[in-house]
């Protein structure tokens, strides 16, 4: 059996083993693409393959690529203190020492979310927890923050940190974040079915469903956390995005930035066994790393990963969060290894 046939069989079996309303598994190997769709919604395959799906925290890889591109252009520096580009005054020594590099690599010492976020989000935790959390509130939370550890000394995943980074990028470039992503990342890559806001059209944007239920949830609103989770994209665009990471030379306008986000930046995990680039988690194998990121919104989940040694990229998208024993993200990761 050929590798392509094996991949097709594995993708088809994985999709058939889910009860997700809409699910897409897509693979690119050596430039050859396979897209398999399924689900319980009754939607036809071509419609599923053309929808734009919420990718949640995978959006951070777009933010990291934008940061790398602006650094390559000299618009900002990775070592810039975040406060240099934000409308806030001086604070604690630790907070003022946080750099753009610390924010994107989750080494800022900031918690996962601001301390006042939970009270705000609790009434809408399973539908749209970020909605209504304003930029002013986010920056106020950062202004009074006291990092849990000295910046650069400990890895701690932080949506808060990447959200702050998005506003710092805006301050440094003097352009709205959405415009920067569109002009600096989406346009050079030719990603025409990728956006940071929905069209509120069920024929365009996939509709999420609740955990272990058929209940539909609203389209995700990241509010002030745009940089940490706003991107929604069609499967073909996401394969194009990953193929550019596999072959940075194919996109001259972004080549330097694409190479930058593949390099190891920090180590973390038990025994410091894992690395994190500016944007991607990385697991080491004998022939090189597997680079990946997963994400979720209240109604959708996503996984993107690529392995340079085998010229392989995998995208997994679903309109319900996984449940025990049906982890779509693990299935997608296994396709890379």
Image (cartoon, helix red, strand yellow):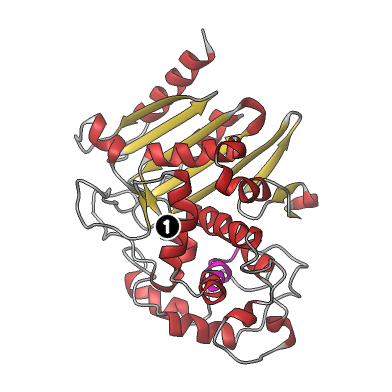
Residue 336 horizontal side relative to residue 118, left or right: right
What residue lies at 44% left-to-right and 51% top-to-bottom?
186
Residue 22: image quadrant is: top left
Residue 326 in view (yes/no):
no
Q: How many marks?
A: 1
Vertical placement of residue 141 versus 188, above or below = below
Question: Circle 1 — which element?
Answer: helix
The spot of residue 260 in percent (x, y) is 67, 50
Residue extending farthest right: 271
Question: Is residue 302 shown in magenta?
Answer: no
Residue 178 in view (yes/no):
yes
Vertical placement of residue 76 versus 88, above or below = above
Residue 71: image quadrant is: bottom right
Q: Which residues are magenta?
A: 157-165
Residue at the spot of label 1: 182
The spot of residue 254 in percent (x, y) is 57, 48
**Front-lying residue, 44 or 262:** 262
**Front-lying residue, 165 or 126:** 165
Residue 9: image quadrant is: top left
The spot of residue 115 in percent (x, y) is 53, 80
Q: Quadrant of the C terminus?
A: top right
Residue 295 horizontal side relative to residue 283, left or right: left
Vertical placement of residue 194 versus 220, above or below = above
Residue 45 horizontal side relative to residue 55, left or right: left
What residue lies at 46% left-to-right and 22% top-to-bottom?
10
| Chief SS of the magenta region | helix
User: Quick one: label 1, few (<14), some, or many (20+) residues within 10 Å?
Assistant: some
The spot of residue 189 in percent (x, y) is 47, 45
What residue lies at 45% left-to-right and 67% top-to-bottom?
177
């Amino acid at each position: 059996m050929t590798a392509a046939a094996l991949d097709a069989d594995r993708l088809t079996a994985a999709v058939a083993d889910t009860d997700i309303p809409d699910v897409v598994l897509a693979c690119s190997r050596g430039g050859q693409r396979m897209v398999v769709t399924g689900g319980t919604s009754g939607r036809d395959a071509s419609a599923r393959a053309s929808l734009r799906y919420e990718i949640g925290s995978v959006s951070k890889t777009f933010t990291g690529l934008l940061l790398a591109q602006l650094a390559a252009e000299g618009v900002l520096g990775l070592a810039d203190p975040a406060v240099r580009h934000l409308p806030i005054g001086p604070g604690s020594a630790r907070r003022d020492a946080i750099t753009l590099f610390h924010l994107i690599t989750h080494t800022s010492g900031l918690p996962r979310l601001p301390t006042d976020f939970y009270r705000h989000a609790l009434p809408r935790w399973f539908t749209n927890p970020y909605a209504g959390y304003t930029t002013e509130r986010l920056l106020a939370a950062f202004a009074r923050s006291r990092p849990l550890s000295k910046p650069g000394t400990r890895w701690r995943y932080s949506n808060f940190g990447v959200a702050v980074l998005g506003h710092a990028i805006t301050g440094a470039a003097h352009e709205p974040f959405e415009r920067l992503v569109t002009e600096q990342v989406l346009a050079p890559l030719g990603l025409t079915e990728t956006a940071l806001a929905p069209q509120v059209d069920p024929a365009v944007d996939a509709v999420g469903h609740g955990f272990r239920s058929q209940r539909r949830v609203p389209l995700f609103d990241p509010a002030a956390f745009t940089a940490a989770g706003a991107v929604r994209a069609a499967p073909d665009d996401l394969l194009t995005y990953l193929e550019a990471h596999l072959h940075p030379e194919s996109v001259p306008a972004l080549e330097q930035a694409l190479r930058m986000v593949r390099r190891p930046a920090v180590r973390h995990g038990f025994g410091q066994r894992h690395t994190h680039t500016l944007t991607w988690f990385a697991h080491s194998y004998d022939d090189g790393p597997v680079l990946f990121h997963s994400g979720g919104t209240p109604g959708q989940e996503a996984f993107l990963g690529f392995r340079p040694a085998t010229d392989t990229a995998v995208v997994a998208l679903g309109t319900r969060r996984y449940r025990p024993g049906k982890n779509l993200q693990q299935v997608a990761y296994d396709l890379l290894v």
